[in-house]
Amino acid sequence: MLCDIIPTHTVAVWLLETIYKALDMLGLKHDKTTEEVIYVAVIVLIALAIGWVLKLAIVWLVRKIIAVKRPNTAALLTQYHVFTRTSRVIPPLVILTLLPFAFTSTSKLLDICERLLWAYTIIVFTIAVTSIVTLAWVGYNNKRNTRNLPLNGVLNTIVGVIWIISAIVVVSVIIDKSPAMLLTGLGAFAAALMLVFKDSILGFVAGIQLSQNDMLRVGDWIVVPSTIANGIVVDVSLSAVKVQNWDNTIVTLPPYTLISTSFQNWRGMTESGCRQIARSILVDANSILPLASDKTDELVARYPLLKPWVDKTRAAGHDTFDPGLATVNGSLETNLGLLRAYLCAYLLQSPSFDHNNQILVRTLAPTPEGVPLQIWAYTSTTAFTAYEAIQSALFEHIIAVAPDFGLEIYNEESGKDAISTVTVDMLPPSSASTTDSSTQTNAKQ
């Protein structure tokens, strides 16, 4: 007992004498029960006062010393309420040291009160320990975890183990049995405990795998195809992974889901500083024609970016194909081949595209709708808005210049096109001729 360690006999005797004198002054009888109740009330008030004074003193000390030298540490101490939680340990300890003097050693009420106080002391001590452990872990995580690995699951596991040990000790104190006996009894309920804590166990194992293999970090943009998760990871704990989607909704996933199924992590794209464009546009196959030399000269005059490649190709006497990553590839034989060369040159001269990665303009397998012309390039930024703006501007430019090369972009006929065709067919021959002549005149203008 604490009364054997801390010399409190003098204090207890003084308190009892004071109570006797107070009863005499009030003219009350010296009843044993009244004296015990008053004594317990006094020591409880004294214990609370001591705890409150010590907390104020420590807080004042922190503000005067730690807040000046280590402001970040002081902020964390305040944020996690370390002083408030640790100061709660003092009142029950004071009560435990003074309480035995109010009762006889064989009192059953004393035994019950001491057990309850010890249980309370263990609980508040556990709260204080977990707050200190959390504070130490957060400090370590902020300084050493430079890769933002999901380590909260480890902290949750440590806190959980502390609370399990605390619960076993509290129960053993209340029932006055050895903790070893409780642990032996818990072995029989191992299967039930595994079922109850299944999610926590799976989450702990998944958290270790995610951290060890560096599969996930706080701040990563992930996409989980089997769920609606598509956004930034904001928190990873023992039982949940929180993802903030683009619409600011929060999706919560069990960590084990990321281990048992596949998911896409865009961290590599973000760290590389560039983002891929791999999009196709359909060209009408009927508009792909051989290219005459005079038409090539006309297009070179209109688009000077083509001149170096055209001169080099003509000097070589055949189409040249450079195997480099960022080169001009195309052909002088067709208008589509020349457009490919122009688009490569356009991408190489634009600062919006990264020239250290693959740049390619190619045709894919023909489809009933036309020949897909694919742009394979990387933007020099990963910012979402800038990326979409660059990609949109590129394909708008392709649609705008394609007619100059004699190419038509495929566009499926709509109801409006059908109505226009029917209207022309229903006109008399003379009117139809006039309409066709007007259309040709307007086209020339």
Image: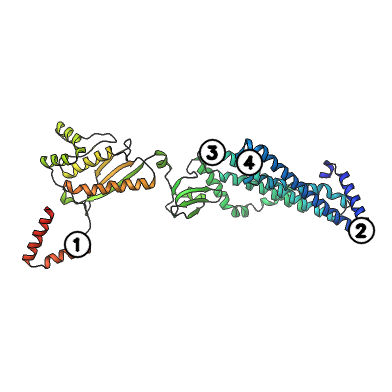
Q: Amino acid at mark 3?
A: Asn
Q: Amino acid at mark 1?
A: Asp
CB within 8 Å, label 1 to label 4: no
Q: Earlier in the sequence, mark 1 or mark 4?
A: 4
Chain-order first, disc 2 or disc 4: 2
Look at the image and tell me whether residue 297 can be seen: yes
Percent across and percent down for residue 150 are 53, 44
Q: Under tag 2, what secondary structure?
A: helix
Q: Of discs 4 and 3, which sits in the foreground?
A: 4
Residue corresponding to mark 2: 26
Q: Which residue is mark 1?
A: 417
Residue extending furthest toward the left: 430
294 lies left or right of 414: left
The amino acid beneath tag 2 is: Leu
Q: CA distance from mark 2 to mark 3?
A: 66 Å
Q: Which of label 2 and label 1 is nearer to you?
A: 2
Judging from the image, what secondary structure is the residue with disc 3 in? loop
Q: Would you name the residue on which mark 4 appears?
A: 74
Dot 4 or dot 3: first in sequence order is: 4
- Amino acid type at image mark 4: Ala
What's the distance in space between the residues labelled 2 and 1, CA to CA? Answer: 108 Å
Q: Which residue is rendered at x = 56% and y = 52% of the image?
A: 199
Q: Which mark is residue 145?
A: 3
How far apart marks 1 and 4 lie (CA) works out to: 73 Å
For marks 3 and 1, give the CA distance: 62 Å
Q: CA distance from mark 4 to mark 3?
A: 20 Å
Along the polypeptide, which appears first: circle 2 or circle 3? 2
